[in-house]
Amino acid sequence: MFSVSVHTKQEMHPIHIKKDSSQILINVITYILVTVFCVMCILPFWMIIASSFSTEEAIRRSGFTLWPTDFSTYSYELLFRSPDQMIGAYIVTILLAGVGTLVGLFLISMTGYALQRKDFPLRNGIMFYIYFTSLFSAGLVPFYLLMVQTLNLRDSYLAILLPLLMSPWLIVLMKNFVKAIPHEITESGKIDGAGDFRIFYQLILPNLKPALATIGLFLALSYWNEWYYSSLFLTSKVEYRPLQYHLYNVINKVASLKNSVAGSNVIITDLPGETLKMATAVVATGPIILLYPFVQKYFVAGLTVGAVKG
């Protein structure tokens, strides 16, 4: 009887992956191109910020520069001269964007889910109707009569909220997202006895997070930048108007004041023009830019759905 002892010694060595010169060159070129592209994207907005803190005389003398010339905050002081109006405009816009985005996502997601269901017999007819409305419209006059006379929405924020809730393009986009979800998920819910709303809420919606974030951002931007419907349906009886329309009125009032004294003996040197437009752009676009980092990871070309048992 004997015993054999075996001693093994394993040594772990770090693995070094050497990059060849061509791979390093490609990485350097890629980083340089991405950096240049980022600078080109940031530079215009930076120039807008710098110009908004310059004086009107400096803009006329030196043009738009990367750094404020003759630093001044007069344009912002003019915009916020009535702080209650500005704060009210922000509150109205935030509420419209929040409510409109949530309600719009609910309606668009349900519509996209229904239109991709093969057991829905009217899906082709409804889809044709939606697509047809994206090509042809009745025009401004019938739309105005519908909102003012039929629905009686003059001086109502619903006149701004309702027209932007859904759009044919967003419905088609949501339909394509839902179509990428395997049909076996819906069938598994039916086998377990779940109804259509429960299947939609518990099985479909969790897989639509990228679509909801993407379309939600589009909806939020459309409400945030809205001013046209406000000019049509909101009159002087409304105390607070959406932000974009409020800023639009401020610029028009300043421009009309400058035009009214043109050719007369009255000289207005401090009244801003171009700097006011730059300050307006900063005030209008600044807050919505903060929303993008929270949804940028969802902007992907496709939608990856979890594996399905079967």
Image (tube, rainbow, N blue to C red):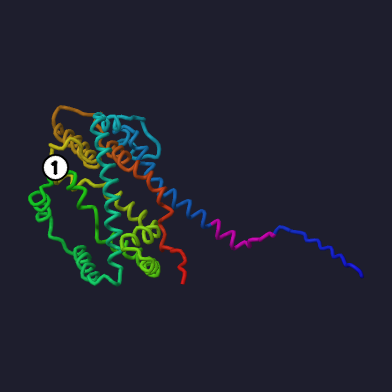
The amino acid on which the numbered mark 1 sits, given as a three-letter code, is Asp
Residue at the extreme left of the image, as rendered:
149
| Residue 142 on image: x %, y % | 9, 56
Magenta stretch contains residue 250: no
Image point (24%, 56%), residue name: 166
- Residue sitting at 12 percent across and 60 percent down? 138
Span highlighted in magenta in the image: 15-28
Residue 171 coordinates in the image, percent (x, y): 28, 61
| 26 relative to 232 in the view: left or right | right
Q: How many marks?
A: 1
Tell me which corner region of the image, top left, top right, bottom left or bottom right, holds residue 289: top left
Residue 182 sits in quarter? bottom left
Q: Examine the rendered structure and indicate whether residue 70 appears above or below residue 297.
A: above
Secondary element under disc 1, as helix, strand or loop, is loop
Quarter that holds the N terminus: bottom right
- Along the horizontal axis of the image, is 73 left or right of 82? right
Pointer 1 local density, CA inside 10 Å: few below 14, some 14–19, many at least 20:
some
Residue 308 point in image, percent of width and height: 45, 68
Task: Indicate whether 223 appears above or below 116.
Answer: above
Q: What is the residue that sits farthest to the top in this orientation?
A: 266
Residue situated furthest right in the rendering: 1
Q: Is residue 298 left or right of residue 151?
A: right
Near-viewer residue (218 or 203): 203
Q: Between residue 49 and residue 260, name the one nearer to us.
A: 49
- Where does the image place residue 69, in percent across and percent down from the top left? 37, 33
What residue would you read off at disc 1? Answer: 155
Task: Report the front residue among 265 and 245.
Answer: 245
Q: Looking at the image, is 294 positioned above or below residue 176?
A: above
In the rendered image, which quarter is residue 188 located in? Answer: bottom left
- At horizontal 41% and vertical 52% (from top left) the residue drawn is 296
